[in-house]
Image: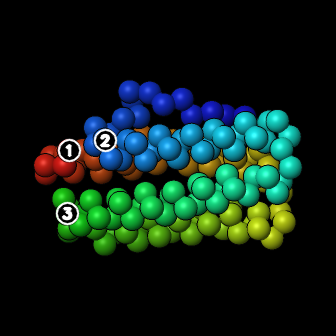
Amino acid sequence: MKRIVWSAEMKSGVPQIDEQQKKLAGIVNQLAMAKEEGVDQEELSPIIRDFSEHLKDYFACEVRMFERYSPKNAPKHDEQRKIELADINSFRDRHKRGEEITEESVDYLHDWLVQHVLVADKSAADLMKSRGAK
């Protein structure tokens, strides 16, 4: 299964964002390791819950930063994050209903997070830094 290896390329240059992204990457890696070790589906629940809760907090932080550094873009950004959060929460909810967490599901979380960090957050951080974010 895929792992996220945090690298300089992934850094946004905004420490608050970087720390939260590293935490999310660690949780995805923890889920991948648990799947590889054959951990029971029920034992995956706390990991999935941690990811979902941290993502919610992270997105709320992003929204606050957009409101401060790019208020014109904040509503569009907030709407996109709500869609992404609903998608991730559906993953969590399917697990709660007893659906198996597959390797493909974990790889999806990996790919989504890497794409989010390298594209969406990188460009957002560049905009925020140009307006004084540190």
Residue 28 location (% of width, % of height): 62, 44
Residue at 73%, 36% in the rendered image: 33
Report the amino acid beneath label 2.
Answer: Pro
Secondary structure at numbered mark 2: helix
Residue 10 x, y percent position in the rendering: 41, 34
On screen, residue 123 above or below 56: above
Amino acid at the residue labelled 3: Arg
Q: Which amino acid does label 1 sit on?
A: Lys
- Where does label 1 land, which residue? 134
Image location of residue 123, percent across then percent down? 31, 46
Q: Residues within 10 Å of mark 1 (few under 14, many from 20)?
A: few
Q: Nearer the viewer, residue 3 or 123?
A: 3
Name the residue at 26% across, 62% down.
Answer: 66
Quarter in which the N terminus is drawn: top right
State the SS at label 1. loop
CA gap, disc 3 and disc 2: 16 Å
Q: Which residue is labeled 2 in the image?
A: 15
Q: How far apart are marks 2 and 1 (CA)?
A: 7 Å
Quarter of the rendering containing residue 89: bottom right
Describe the colour scheme in one phrase.
rainbow
- The residue at 80%/70% (across/down) is 97
Q: Name the disc covering residue 68, or none.
A: 3
Q: Categorize mark 2 by other alpha carbons within 10 Å: few (<14), some (14-19), many (20+).
A: few
Q: In this view, does 71 lie above or below 47?
A: below
Q: What element carries label 3?
A: helix
Q: Can residue 84 be seen in this view?
A: no
